Amino acid sequence: MTQDTPATVLLDPHGAEFAADPYSTYAALRALDGPYYYKEIDTWMLTRMADVEAVALNKTMLRNNEAFISEDARLAQQRAINFHDMPHHERFVQVNLLESEGATHDRLRKVVFREFTPAMIARQREAIQSFVDRLLDSLSDQDEVDFVGDFAAHVPGHIIGRILGVPDEDCPQLRHWSEEVVRFFDPGRGDEDKARAEQATKEFYEYLLDLLAERERAPQDDLLSRLIGHRDGGRLSQDELISTAMLILMAGHGSTIDVLGSGMHALLRYPEQHDRLREDPSLMKTAVQEMFRYESPLPFFHRFATEETEVGGKLFPAGTRFGLLYGAANRDPARFENPDKFDVGRTPNRHMAFGGGGHFCLGNHLARLDMDVIFSTLNTRFAAISLAEETPEYKRGLSVRGPKALRVAWQRA
């Protein structure tokens, strides 16, 4: 089918124009009569909520296609996307909970799900509040800061690191490793990106090995000690323990930093919505959900069809790779009224920023708690916050969405 669908829209996720405004491109793709074939990654891109939701919830659609291709084909595919000759990346990143399917995925998800309970998440509020207060104390004498670099970048990794059992002083290094690993998933990666991702994974692995040895000698009340218990109970292997810990730390860093930055940017671009939230703090939960919908921090994932499937009114053969553009689906006018409007009171708000089906984000409750505490505290401690730069630069690529930096001016209450 790839031969008879003309590319009537240019998709250039690496360009400055797309980084500044991907939503015009998404709207043009949605207006096509079916999915858009993106030749660069041999993927049919889905932009309508109905299509994205249907594929995400379809149990025959898998994150990887290893169950129905030969080993030779799998290796050829790995070489084609430059995911080969990366021993640590292949061992701990390409086979983690997010990338697994079937019985392995169910087993690993059950282990993690046992730990990320609502009660455990709720217990983090006090620790989050304490850390946010201390960080703001250190910044509040400054009239202008980079909200991303000076503030947002320090919170999520610290919180998820503390839950896992990582010493506070090591969290900045974990953020660096996480960013290097995650960046390699974006289309357009090169050999230099590959080398950095492999080196970061290796160093991450060696760090976790040392931390595991410490917890084996002296268990603590942290997630890493409990994962060791699951390993010793036969519920996951040593490699699965490391890949799971790595995934939790990576997932707890970048995407929450990005949505904190884009969420603040949205509030400052629409001051009437910010004022509305200040006047009615009970809107914070819907405001946080709207921040995830309006600028989805992880706007692209994929699935493989395991059988011939109809998507968007067209038939596709088994083996077809679909791109789930969550960022586009979350601006679909067929699902959302005035989708390009930022509305802190939007309800209902059935967005797809956390994915769907078996790969629904397990950390979504913690991310939303982070956001709730942070923006509630900011609204209490500062009488006014405004943009100190006209047009913040956003990250380039399909797989991430968030400002590189966000200069803001604030006045203490």
Image (spheres, rainbow, N blue to C red):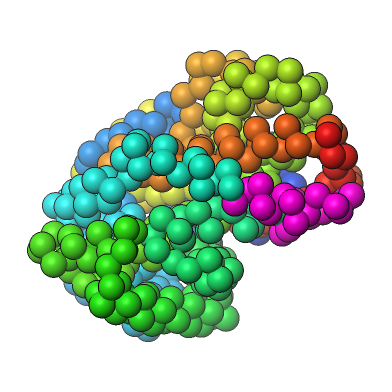
In this rendering, would 74 be left or right of 173?
left
Identified at 27% across, 45% down, the residue is: 113
Q: Residue at x 46, y 34 (%)?
A: 352
Pick the front one: 327 or 409:
409
Taking 170 as reference, is 287 above or below it? above
Query: How many callouts does the rendering have?
Result: 0
The percent position of residue 56, horizontal first and vertical second, equals 35, 38
Q: Where 64 falls versus 80 (above or below)?
A: above
When the figure is inspected, residue 83 is found, relative to residue 144, above or below; the finding is below
Identity of the residue drawn at 71% across and 59% down: 149
Residue that extends furthest to the left in the rendered view of this protein: 234
Q: Is residue 47 visible?
A: no
Which one is in front, 125 or 33? 125
Residue 367 in the image: state x and y as whole percent. Answer: 50, 43
Magenta stretch contains residue 139: yes
Q: Main secondary structure of the magenta part?
A: helix
Residue 152 position in % (x across, y down): 66, 52
Q: Name the spot of residue 76 as percent of width and height, x first.
A: 31, 73
231 horizontally vs 360: left or right: left
Q: Which residues are magenta?
A: 131-150
Instruction: Tell me if 209 is positioned left or right of 298 in this view.
Output: left
Q: Quadrant of the C terminus?
A: top right
Q: Quadrant of residue 379?
A: top right
- Depth check: give the residue in front, 67 or 283: 283
Does the magenta run of residues contain 65? no
In the image, is residue 291 above or below residue 182? Answer: above
Left or right: residue 240 versus residue 10 is: left
Q: Residue at x 57, y 34 (%)?
A: 372
